[in-house]
Image (tube, rainbow, N blue to C red):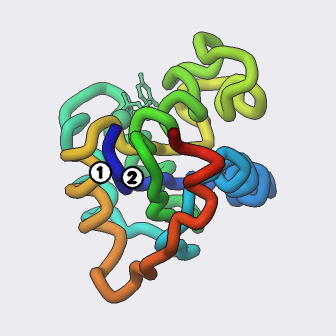
Amino acid sequence: MALQQTLVLCKPDAVSRGLVGEIVRRLEARGYLIVAMKLMQLDGERARKHYGEHAGKPFFNGLVEFITSGPLVALAVEGEDVVEGVRQMMGATNPLQAAPGTIRADFAQQIGRNLVHGSDSADSARRELDIFFEAKEFVSRKHDLNRWLVE
Ligand code: UDP
Ligand code: MG
């Protein structure tokens, strides 16, 4: 078990469809803590940096175009093993393969409009959080509920 932070993005489809509250609600209900959060629109440079691992893939240009097309909500979320926990809550990249009960299965139809991003490892999380947030934008929060969440 490890206390981690991860980057969550409510992508432009989530913002436009009014699903930010639902996504934030799920994260909070699971007991994870939001330690930074903002509504912003990405420029192409930052989008290409964030999705750098996918540069050259057939979907890359469309992905960058979509993620920069409108406002998104970026969150830094903190908790025990939160990287894996958030990935589980999001479900598989393709909503048709995502398990029922996950955000992508419950609210999305297609891979290119799958509502949320979550870092895929602790290393990616650190790299990605750096792209979206400055150190001064993080608040430090007490994990008061941990006695009910963590053995
Ligand atoms: N994506 C896409 N088509 C693909 C693969 C990925 O449009 O064939 C998009 C999709 O929105 C996905 C993002 O690119 O969320 C990043 O892909 P990744 O494999 O990292 O999936 P994720 O980590 O978001 O589940
Ligand atoms: Mg990914």
Distance in Å between CA atoms under marks 1 and 2: 5 Å
Query: Relative to 85, is 114 on the left or the right?
Result: right
Badge 1 vs badge 2, beta-carbon distance below 8 Å? yes
Badge 1 residue CB within 8 Å of ligand 2? no
Amino acid tagged 1? Ala
In terms of depth relative to the viewer, which is nearer, 150 or 125? 150
Image quarter for ligand 1 equals top left
Please give the label number shown on residue 125. 1
Could you tell me which secondary element the residue under label 2 belongs to? strand
What residue is drawn where x is 42% and y is 67%?
A: 42
Q: How many marks?
A: 2
Amino acid tagged 2? Thr
Task: Check the image and report above or below for 74 versus 13.
Answer: below
In terms of depth relative to the viewer, which is nearer, 29 or 100? 29
Q: Residue 100, located in which quarter of the rendered image? A: top right
On-image quarter of the N terminus: top left
Q: Position of residue 40 (x, y in %)?
A: 52, 74
In terms of depth relative to the viewer, which is nearer, 54 or 56? 54
Q: Position of residue 31 (x, y in %)?
A: 63, 51
What residue is drawn where x is 40% and y is 40%?
A: 81
What residue is drawn where x is 63% and y is 59%?
A: 145
Is residue 19 in sight in this rendering? no
Q: Position of residue 93 (x, y in %)?
A: 50, 25
The numbered mark, 1 or 2, whose residue comes first in the sequence reads: 2
Binning the other alpha carbons within 10 Å of mark 1 as few (below 14), some (14 to 19) or many (20 upward) gives many
Identity of the residue furthest to the bottom in this view: 136
Residue beneath disc 2? 6
Q: Residue 30, located in which quarter of the rendered image? A: top right
